C-alpha cells in the first residue's frame, strides 16, 4: 500500500494526502482526500486492512491456549502476542511494522491513544490475560511492564523489517529464532520480580509471604499512602492497587 509505505519511511506528520495521491499515480492529486477525508481516517483504513489477518491469527492462538488449559501460561500468551506481528515481516515487501512504529511515535507512547488510531481487536483480550498472568507484579508496575513489552515488540520487529527490506540480515537471527528470542526478552520484562528499590520508590511494601505472592502484591500500598489518597478525595482511591488491573494491552502496541 502506497500510504503505508510512505508513512513507514517518512513518518506520519511528514506525508500529506496529496503526496500519497501523487505517489500512487492518481491523476487527481486530491484522490486520497476524496476517498478518506483525513489522514486519521486513512490510518484507520490501513489498520482495518492489516488487522483482519493479524487479529484472526492471534485469536486462533489464544483460543488454542484456552482449550489446552494454558490461559495463564505467561510465555505461551506472550508468544501469541508476538508471533502474529512478527510473521508480517517475512511475508514479503512489508512496511506494516515500521508504519506501526511511526504511529506509536505520532500518537505517543501511551497505548491509551492508539484505539483512536484504529489499533483495536485481539490486543484487548490478550492484554488482559497477560496482565492476569502477572499477578506476582504490583498493579502499577504491571501496567508499565505491559507498555514496555509492547514497545519492545513493535520497535524490535520494525528494526528487523527494515533490515530484511535492505538485505542487511547478516547479524539478524533467522525468523523462527528471532520470534523465540523476542518472546524470551518480552517475557523477561513481564516476569521479572519488582526490585526492593522499585517498590520503595513507589512506597510499596515488599511481600513477606512468598507462598501467596498474588495476595501480597494486591495489598502492597502502605497505610500512609492509602490514607493520603483518602484524605485528598474523601474516599478510597478506586484505581488503587487492590483493584484488578485494566490492562490496555501491550501495545501495545500489539497491533
Image (cartoon, helix red, strand yellow):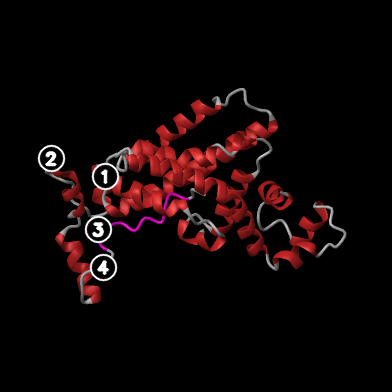
The segment highlighted magenta reads 240-252
Q: Nearer the viewer, mark 1 or mark 2?
A: 2
Instruction: Please report the residue visible at 79 percent of the width from the left and 63 percent of the height from the top.
Output: 31
Nearest the viewer among 75 and 157 is 75
Q: Check disc 3 and report the residue beneath it.
A: 241
Q: CA distance from mark 2 to mark 3?
A: 20 Å
Q: Secondary structure at mark 3?
A: loop
Q: Is residue 249 magenta?
A: yes
Measured along the vertical axis of the image, is residue 247 above or below residue 68?
Answer: below
Q: Earlier in the sequence, mark 2 or mark 4?
A: 2
Q: CA distance from mark 1 to mark 2?
A: 22 Å
Q: CA distance from mark 2 to mark 4?
A: 27 Å
Instruction: Please report the residue visible at 74 percent of the width from the left and 50 percent of the height from the top.
Output: 2
Q: Earlier in the sequence, mark 1 or mark 2?
A: 1
Q: Earlier in the sequence, mark 2 or mark 3?
A: 2
Q: Secondary structure at mark 1?
A: helix
Where on the picture, by quarter, is residue 172? top right
* Number of residues whose C-alpha sits closer than 10 Å to that of mark 1, classed few (under 14), some (14–19) or many (20 or more): few
Q: CA distance from mark 4 to mark 1?
A: 26 Å
Q: Using residue 17 as the reference point, say whether residue 75 is left or right of it.
A: left
Q: Furthest-right residue in view?
A: 27
Q: Check disc 2 and report the residue beneath it.
A: 211
Q: Nearer the viewer, mark 4 or mark 1?
A: 4
Q: Check disc 1 and report the residue beneath it.
A: 197
Measured along the vertical axis of the image, is residue 229 above or below residue 166?
Answer: below
Q: Position of residue 231 (x, y in %)?
A: 20, 73
Q: Check disc 4 and report the residue beneath it.
A: 238
Q: Nearer the viewer, mark 3 or mark 1?
A: 3
Is mark 4 in CB contact (under 8 Å) with mark 1?
Answer: no
Amino acid at each position: 500500500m502506497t500510504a503505508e509505505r510512505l508513512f513507514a519511511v517518512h513518518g506520519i506528520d511528514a506525508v500529506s494526502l496529496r503526496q500519497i495521491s501523487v505517489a500512487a499515480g492518481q491523476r487527481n492529486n486530491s484522490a486520497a482526500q476524496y476517498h478518506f477525508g483525513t489522514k486519521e481516517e486513512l490510518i484507520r483504513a490501513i489498520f482495518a486492512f492489516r488487522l483482519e489477518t493479524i487479529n484472526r491469527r492471534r485469536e486462533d492462538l489464544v483460543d488454542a491456549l484456552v482449550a489446552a488449559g494454558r490461559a495463564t501460561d505467561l510465555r505461551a500468551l506472550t508468544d501469541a502476542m508476538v508471533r502474529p506481528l512478527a510473521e508480517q515481516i517475512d511475508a514479503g515487501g512489508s512496511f506494516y511494522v515500521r508504519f506501526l512504529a511511526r504511529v506509536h511515535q505520532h500518537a505517543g507512547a501511551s497505548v491509551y491513544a492508539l484505539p483512536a488510531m484504529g489499533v483495536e481487536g485481539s490486543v484487548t483480550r490478550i492484554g488482559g490475560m497477560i496482565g492476569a498472568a502477572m499477578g506476582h507484579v504490583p498493579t502499577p508496575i504491571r501496567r508499565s511492564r505491559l507498555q514496555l513489552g509492547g514497545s519492545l515488540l513493535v520497535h524490535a520487529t520494525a528494526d528487523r523489517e527494515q533490515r530484511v527490506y535492505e538485505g542487511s540480515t547478516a547479524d539478524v537471527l533467522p525468523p523462527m529464532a528471532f520470534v523465540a528470542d523476542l518472546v524470551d526478552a518480552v517475557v523477561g520484562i513481564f516476569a521479572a520480580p519488582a526490585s526492593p528499590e522499585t517498590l520503595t520508590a513507589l512506597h510499596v511494601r515488599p511481600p513477606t509471604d512468598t507462598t501467596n505472592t498474588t495476595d501480597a502484591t494486591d495489598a502492597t500500598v502502605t497505610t500512609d499512602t492509602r490514607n493520603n489518597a483518602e484524605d485528598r478525595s474523601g474516599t478510597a482511591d478506586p484505581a488503587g492497587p487492590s483493584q484488578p488491573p485494566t490492562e490496555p494491552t501491550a501495545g501495545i502496541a500489539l497491533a
